[in-house]
Structure formats: C-alpha cells, structure tokens
Image (cartoon, rainbow, N blue to C red):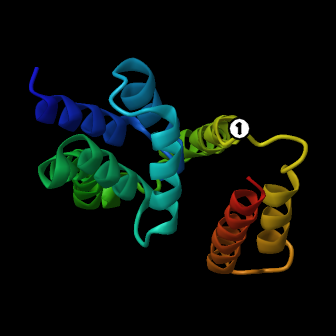
Amino acid sequence: MNIYLEAFGIFFKIGAFTIGGGYAMVPLIENEIVTKRKWIAQDDFIDLLAISQSAPGILAVNISIFIGYKLRGIRGSIVTALGTILPSFLIILAIALFFHSFKDNPIVERIFRGIRPAVVALIAAPTFTMGRSAKINRYNLWIPVVSALLIWLLGFSPIWIIIAAGVGGFLWGKVKKVES
C-alpha cells in the first residue's frame, strides 16, 4: 500500500475516533506508528512528542506533522496533518449545522457526562507510558512532580517550566560529558 494513503488513513481514523484531544491520541498514534508498523523507533517517538508539546499549536497536529516529516518529508507532513485535521473539521461542521436541534436533548447531555471520565483516562494512560519510556525512576521522579506542583499550585507558566527543563537538561548533559 502507498505509505501516503496508509499514513493518511491512520491519522484520519485516529482523528475521527479519539475524543479528548491530542493527549488522548498519543497512545493510539504510538501503537500504530511505533508498535504495529515500526515506522519510528520508540526513542524517536518520545523526542518527537517532546518537540510537539514544546512547539506552538495543537499537540495532535504538531505530532502528526513531525511524524509525517520524519517518514516522508514535507509531503508526508502535509498528508498526516490533513489526516489529523479533516475528521475534526467535518465533525465540527456537522455539529454546527445541526446543533440547535439537539443542544437541549437530555440524552445528549447524559452521553457527554459519560464520555468525560473516559477522556480523563485516555489522557492519563499516555502519561504513565511516557514516564516509562522517558526512563522516569525514583531518582528523577521529583522533576515531573515538582513541575506539576509549580504549575498547578503556584500558577507557574508551563513555558517557564519547559525552558528551565531544557536549560537543566543541557547543563546536565554538559556536566556528564565533562565527567566522561
């Protein structure tokens, strides 16, 4: 099968059937791209995910663009980005056209109340998977915990946390290089 069509189909399917946004898509993308097809190594996927989270824009679109680029350059990034964006666009368009007729329907309200906890689980699952892949252990567990607490309790901007983590990682790498 043509890799462009296959990649478009994968990202279209994930985009169409994932509720909860980019973080809910991460385990599905990882399963399809890293585990099933082995198009990208696990370490490369983690790196692409980190870059996607750091780059401005929507995580799902960013990760699809970076994966597409890694697979087939600019054409690959366009194909995977379209695969990710198109389902949401079509669904939102359909909802916008018909929203007024079902917005106060109690069945629809109950459906959304049931979906919310599933979305939380879909977002939490990749967090643990990424923690294992990033080799989080008892010696460095303090980094994500302190980062989360600074953002959640003290209202620090995630941008400053990312910058501090990047500078810290760079300096740690320099120290380890000098020791070697």
Q: Position of residue 77 (x, y in %)?
A: 21, 52
Residue 25 in view of the camera: no
Task: Tell me where residue 27 appears, x and y as whole percent.
Answer: 52, 34
Q: Which sits in the foreground, 74 or 32?
A: 74
Give left or right: position of 111 versus 129: left
Circle 1: residue type? Phe
| Residue 1 in the image: above or below residue 7 | above
Residue drawn at 51 percent across, 61 percent down: 53
Kindly identify the residue that appears in the image at 53 percent across and 44 percent down: 46
Q: Residue at x 18, y 50 (%)?
A: 73
Quarter placement of the N terminus: top left
Q: Is residue 179 above or below residue 147?
A: above
Q: Position of residue 72 (x, y in %)?
A: 18, 43
Could you say whether the residue bearing mark 1 is in a helix, strand or loop? Answer: helix
Q: Quadrant of residue 124?
A: top right
Pick the front one: 172 or 5: 172
- The residue drawn where x is 51% and y is 67% is 54
Taking the image as drawn, is residue 111 in sight? yes
Q: Which residue is mark 1?
A: 128
125 is higher (above) or lower (below) than 92: above
User: How many numbered marks appear?
Assistant: 1
Q: Residues within 10 Å of mark 1 (few under 14, many from 20)?
A: few
- Where is residue 100 shown, x and y percent of the image? 33, 61
